[in-house]
Image: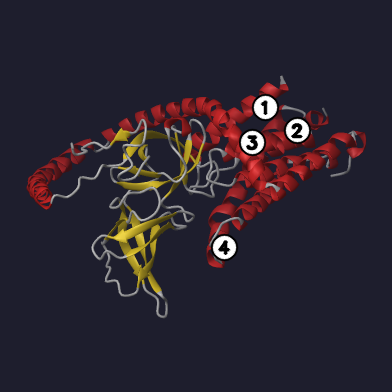
Amino acid sequence: MKFFFYLTLVLLLVPLQTTVLPHVSVWNIKPDLGLVTAVFIGLFAGEMEGLLLGLAIGWALSLFSAGELWLSLLTYGGVGLLAGFLGRQVSQVTSISLGVGLLLVSVASGLLAMANFKNIDMSHMWGIVESIVLPQACFDGAVGAGLYWLLSQRFDVTRLRAE
Amino acid sequence: MWMVNSRFSSGARRLAFACFALLVAALFLLPGQIQGLLQYLDGPVGHIVRVPLEAVASIDAGIADRWQQYMALQGVREENQQLRKDMESLRGQNSQLRESAAATERLTALLQFKEQALPAMVAAQVIGRDATNRYRAIILNKGESDGIKPDMGVITPAGVVGRVVKTTGATSVVLLVTDPNNAIAGLIQRTRDEGIVEGTQQGLAQLKYIPLLSTLRDGDRVVTSGLVGGFPRGLALGTITHIDKQEGALFQSAELMPEVDVGRVEEVLVIQASYGQSTKAMGGMELPGKPSP
């Protein structure tokens, strides 16, 4: 049952990210729902599921991106694992702390991806950080915080995480 | 926040970390093999993911069509009048061009030029945009099973759109001409100087490595040079809008306004084989207007 839920999640994530989100992008920046999903799964289901679903999301999204496959696998898998680990260590997660965490993770993954760009000088690098990495990190953090807040309004998230 | 890790088993955690460490090690030590293995599975996975992707894309296109039809009604009368005026002027130009075409045909026959076959092409629809914000790329609804391979050129009747960089069984990813990671060999049509066209951070393009002695100017058109890559010679890339000539530099560069508005492109043609190879390509669509042998 869980497997089919995850499969549906990954299959829906791809069209949502590639077809629907470009319409709601702000200054051509759209949130990375794959990153947000990997964090949520890691947080609620633990390291192992966070890692596996992160890898699946990374693989599926890399099929529909010009980026490198290994980078996508490392980023999403690592983020799922990290979220699972932190989820076990920290008992009280608030929407603000989750948003800030997602922002930092998004900045880190953006910088890692940027380091992989070829023939790029410092001025261009700062331009990319300013125009893509930071706005996207803010967007990711806001979406994650909003989603967590919505979940916490409807469900007992502490119990969900313990289960 | 406080620590609560006591009641969770550390076995799963250790296993997860071990798996991740193994993956990282494998990706660094055997990058080709691991990626090759995953890319082998890309084909079937691409076919599965294509189903929801195309469903969502068609719903999205339907909504966009309705909205555009509604928006099109706004100010349609003024637009109609303007179009009528444009049509009158274009009729005049058309008759002049017909004359030129006829003259060219006669001259070609006279010079006994060997007739070149136009490239084989396959038409594809844009069903999405790059999954990340870091690349300017579009997703097409045709892939390896339709004969599309990486490095093939992608165009519209207006000009160059980009280059295929990745394919699955049923889809392909096209890196747009406006992406800074893309590079296409270009030629200034008037001066015949060659350079490399790359995208910029601002979503435009630039022609780099132009010889210092080139007499280029604003408004010059840049076309593909046909020397490398999947593009034949003469496809429109863009128009020069600004020239950058720095003192002491070995080359000059120029900013281009791309010929195709890549942000709005919906249907494209993928060039499957360049000039002279079109007969070898299977299942390709021929460009309308191909001269009969």
Give neighbour class at mark 1: few <14, some 14-19, many 20+ (Cα, 10 Å): some
Residue visible at 55% across and 26% down? B48
Distance between the Cα atoms at labels 2 and 3? 12 Å
Amino acid at pointer 4:
Trp
Q: Position of residue B70 (x, y in %)?
A: 32, 31
Distance between the Cα atoms at labels 2 and 1? 10 Å
Using the rendered image, report if marks 4 and 2 lie on a common chain. yes
Which residue matches tag 1?
A: A6
Q: Earlier in the sequence, mark 4 or mark 2?
A: 2
Amino acid at pointer 2:
Glu
Q: Quadrant of the C terminus of chain A?
A: top right
Disc 3 + disc 4, Cβ < 8 Å = no
Q: Earlier in the sequence, mark 1 or mark 3?
A: 1
Q: Position of residue B243 (x, y in %)?
A: 34, 68
- The numbered dot on residue B42 is none
Using the rendered image, report if marks 2 and 3 lie on a common chain. yes
Q: Secondary structure at mark 4?
A: helix
- The numbered dot on residue A57 is 3
Q: Earlier in the sequence, mark 3 or mark 4?
A: 3
Which residue matches tag 4?
A: A126
Give neighbour class at mark 3: few <14, some 14-19, many 20+ (Cα, 10 Å): many
Q: Is residue B178 in view?
A: yes
Give neighbour class at mark 2: few <14, some 14-19, many 20+ (Cα, 10 Å): many
Q: Position of residue B266 (x, y in %)?
A: 37, 37
Q: Earlier in the sequence, mark 2 or mark 3?
A: 2
Q: Is residue B59 above or below residue A123?
A: above
- Left or right: B234, with B40 as reference point: left
Which residue matches tag 2?
A: A49
User: Which chain does tag 4 point to?
Assistant: A
Question: Given this view, does label 3 or label 4 mark the residue nearer the observer?
Answer: 3
Distance between the Cα atoms at labels 4 and 2? 35 Å
